[in-house]
Amino acid sequence: MDSIKKRIRRTAEQRLADLENKQAEILERQRAALAKIEEEKKKLMESPSSRKKNLEQEKRFARAASALAPDWDIRHYIAAIEKALIDDAEALLARGEALLAEHGKGKRGRRTKNG
């Protein structure tokens, strides 16, 4: 009967330390999972279809910007963005969609090589 183990009662500090260790392990697993998700998002954003879509968006932006404000340069756009940050984002998004639909489309028909 010498092999009977007595239950050792752990102190509150020991239990607290165990909980903190467990929390640290969980946070580390979450960080690893989030990093994996970010890596997958990055891969998707660099896929050929995403690049093509982004390039088309940039072209639409350039066409709309030159149609709306032909004499503006980059400094004007930066200042306008800074002013717009004060406004409501949802309203800006809706208005931007409408303006892109109106001014962001390319001209229809064939284009010559040099123009």
Image: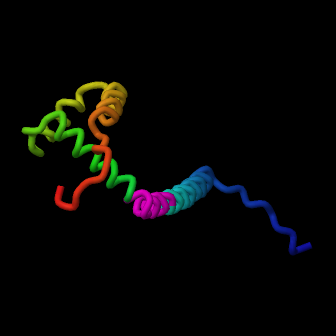
Which colouring convention does the figure follow? Answer: rainbow
- Which quarter of the rendering shows the C terminus? bottom left
Q: Residue 72, image x and y in percent? A: 9, 39
Q: Is residue 17 visible?
A: no
Reply yes or no: does residue 35 show up in magenta.
no
Q: Left of 4 or right of it: where is 104?
A: left
Q: Is residue 93 above or below residue 56?
A: above
Please identify the dominant SS of the magenta region: helix
- Specify whether residue 30 is in view: yes
Please name the residue shown 40% across and 63% down the image: 46
The part of the chain drawn in magenta is 37-51
At 24% from the left edge and 39% from the top edge, which residue is drawn? 64
Question: Residue 112, how many percent across, how many down?
Answer: 22, 57
**Magenta-colored stretch includes residue 42:** yes
104 or 10, which lies in front?
Answer: 104
Q: Image height check: is 110 above or below 76?
A: below
Residue 105, compared with residue 47, is above or below; it is above
Q: Position of residue 104 (x, y in %)?
A: 29, 40
Determine which quarter of the picture holds residue 73. top left
- In depth, the one of 15 and 29 nearer the eye is 29
